[in-house]
Amino acid sequence: MISTSPVRPGAGVRYLFRGVMVGDGHRAVGTPLRAAQDEAGVPPGVWKGRGLAALGLQVGDVVTERQAELLLGEGRHPDADRIEHKLLAKGESPARARRATVLGRPIEHNQSLETQKAKERIPWLGMDLVF
């Protein structure tokens, strides 16, 4: 059986969390990522790469659901919650503490008029075929 899943602009992170991270299966809403991975027989994702030391991460450490949300969904440091808490405890303003965790601009959160028009013209960003 072949199934298709259209990936629309702005839905990439949801697509990753609901399907790809659980072995191209389906993750029911409200099911914790780790539980869905266990049920599907999929090992958890681990951190890899040469730039991890700059982020204070270790090769082979398990990527938590929150870390993935922060990095992939918000373009922020995977440990942004911890960093913000530490900066707030030192007296930084909430705005400065948050800015300190931003690693880039999340593509899906670009709300420019051009991006909105492109979403109307391009109904699908990609297609996932599962055989």
Image (spheres, helix red, strand yellow):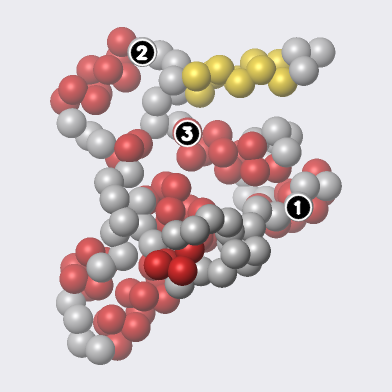
Q: Quadrant of residue 77?
A: bottom left
Is residue 39 found left or right of 81 in the rendered image? Answer: right
Of residues 37 and 53, which is closer to you in this image? Answer: 53
Is residue 53 found left or right of 25 in the rendered image? Answer: left
Q: Nearer the viewer, mark 3 or mark 1?
A: 1
Of residues 127 and 8, which is closer to you in this image? Answer: 127
Q: Measured along the vertical axis of the image, is residue 89 above or below residue 21?
A: below
How many other residues sit within 10 Å of disc 3, few (<14), some (14-19) or many (≥20)?
A: some
Query: At label 3, which amino acid type do we have?
Result: Gly
Q: Measured along the vertical axis of the image, is residue 10 above or below residue 40?
A: above
The residue at which mark 1 appears reads as 43
Query: At label 2, which amino acid type do we have?
Result: Ile
Residue placed at 32% from the left, 44% from the top?
Answer: 106
- Residues under labels 3 and 1: Cα distance? 21 Å
Q: Quadrant of the N terminus?
A: top right
Q: Secondary structure at mark 1?
A: loop
Q: Earlier in the sequence, mark 2 or mark 1?
A: 1
Does the CB distance between marks 3 and 1 fall below 8 Å? no
- Residue 54, percent from left and from top: 40, 67
Is residue 35 found left or right of 120 in the rendered image? Answer: right
The residue at which mark 2 appears reads as 122
Query: At label 1, which amino acid type do we have?
Result: Pro
The residue at which mark 3 appears reads as 12
Q: Earlier in the sequence, mark 3 or mark 1?
A: 3
Residue placed at 18% from the left, 77% from the top?
Answer: 93
